[in-house]
Image (cartoon, rainbow, N blue to C red):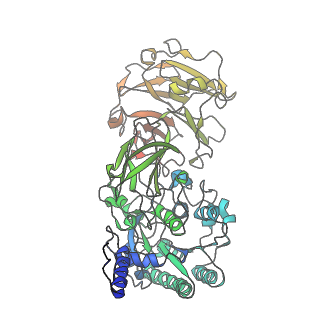
Amino acid sequence: MKKRPFIPMFVCLFLVALLSCQNDFDSNDTNPKSQRKTAGKSDKKKKVLLVGIDGLQFEKINGTATPNLDKLNIKKGFSGGISGTRSEQKTKSGPGWTTILTGVWIDQHGVPDNSTSHTSKVPSVFKYIKQHNRNLETASVATWAPIHDFLRNDLSDIDYPYKGGNDDTAVHRAVSELTNHNPDFLFVHLDEVDVVGHSSGFGASYDAAIRRADSRFGTIMTAVEQRMNTKNEDWLVLVTTDHGRESSGYNHGSQTTSEKVIFIGMNQAGNAAFTTFVNTVPNQGFGGVYGAIPQTALIPTALTHLGVPIRKDWQLTSSSLVGNAGVLALMMKNANTLYWNANGGGSVSIYRNGQFLATTAASAQEYTDTTQPKGVNNYTVVYNGQTASVSTNNANIIACLDWNDTLNNRAYFFKDDASYIRYNKLADKADSGYPKPTNNSAWPGLGAYANNLSAAFKWHNHKAYFFLNDGRYLRYDMNADKVDSGYPVAITNSNWPGLAAYKDKIIAAINWNNSKAYFFLNDGSYLRYSISSDRVDTGYPKPITNSSWPGLGAYAQKISAAVDWNTTYCYFFLNDKTYIKYNKITDKAVSGYPLPVNGSTWPGL
């Protein structure tokens, strides 16, 4: 029997200590000191402070004395969604703050502007927190009162809601919350920087407002630090803004680089989603800003720090900036291909419209959906317990109808997924609750032909005509709100003189002020129809060129629908989800078109 060698006690203690130190290191960690520091905080109560400084231009921070903001790690981010997609939203406060507090873009929250008539369609961070644990305390200080109006469905989930007042009032309320209550999540909105920007633009007054905002933030941080020094709490501090500003500093709302660029500051080092700028995004618009941190990342970051598990059915748009990083920069590479960036191995799970679709390697960084159905498709990619989501709509507008009512305030848009949208022309947005299916309940007599529509227009005597892709048409009585008896019938030279030879080529139609009607064909030509003579004019069809239709010629074979809007304008919709505004008086396309059909140009469409 062998004897075990004698090991002195001090050697044993040394080996134990050495092994303990080695366990503090991770082979993939480049900052083991910070990891040990984080591990030491694991038993502390997690808290989040989110401070929003309205309208603070990212580039102006470096040129201004901001000693309190300078203590944070600050990175470039972007607002306004991704231009030309369903996520594009105005760089205004309404959609901006709604995005910040819900973690999604307009395609999900549905707040297009600053009108308080809008209510977020999705839950906010306050509801997510309360659903996880009703005992967690929430507080919100909204100096700009409409922020709470957009979240009116979730106000019962805010234990201490405050709105209105000025920035000094906001600081007083925030400090009072930190001193007298026990907030687990505290949101504070400061408004003065934006107000000064609107009144004075960039300059000395704007810089002074930034310095005052920094000082106010410092006052709030003093109260936070007091809690950290006296209580067993781990505070994650996030600071951001809702939008940038145009070059003079006065205004904002459009899709320009300076208006889209924002910042995200954090008192922690952050994970790869915070530190990585993705240079390989397929959309390199606005100086490649889509490789920066999206505005949607703030709420998953807050939830992750608070220990609230991220659920895939929430379809949060971006990964948390702390903890494990999910995929970064998720976007549509093309109509049916997802792109992402992943900082690690393993696999991602992909869901479409809430249903499991596929598993693939994270390193693949793209996935093509070969079975994509028509219409809106919401994709969610799950990785490392985090989600990233993007939506796309592959349904095209195939017919439009300017309705016949006394206010002339409605138009209808029909899509090739057998759905339709009612659009309020006066409010310039789609009515709530749409799209709806094009069926016989909504459109008596039309439902059976919803998949065959190719064009529509309003005639006279309260009649509308729908043209089908098989050469037939229906006459719709707008007073009775139903298809007339006996339809559809085939287009012939008896009922539409001169049109019969082109009956299955019609892709769009417009009634031009009750004088002429125009039929646009799928070969890039058009017919002019005399309403008074009730027949196609002699010499047609003719090619759609920049001589016959100035500004439309290059898009002749991309037209998918058209609608007469008023005595001055009509609109042409193209098969790449863009549109052209056409001036009937000057007889030419308005400069600057085509533009994408999105939440900014056609809200809800």
x, y percent for residue 406: 67, 39
Is residue 524 placed above or below 337 in the rendered structure? above
From the viewer's perspective, tell me whether residue 271 is left or right of residue 436: left
Q: Quadrant of residue 334?
A: top left
Q: Observer-nearest residue: 515 or 464? A: 464
Furthest residue toward front? 1
x, y percent for residue 540: 38, 21
Question: Which residue is at a point 35% across and 28% down the rendered structure image?
Answer: 524
Q: Quadrant of residue 28?
A: bottom left
Question: Which residue is at a point 45% across and 58% down the rendered structure image?
Answer: 318
Is residue 468 placed above or below 417 in the rendered structure? above
Question: Which residue is at a point 60% across and 58% down the rendered structure image?
Answer: 123
Q: Observer-nearest residue: 396 or 567? A: 396
x, y percent for residue 272: 37, 65
The N terminus sits in image quarter? bottom left
x, y percent for residue 458: 57, 30
From the viewer's perspective, tell me whether residue 353 is left or right of residue 63: right
Q: How many marks?
A: 0
From the viewer's perspective, tell me whether residue 321 is left or right of residue 100: left
Q: Is residue 299 visible?
A: yes
Q: Is residue 84 visible?
A: no
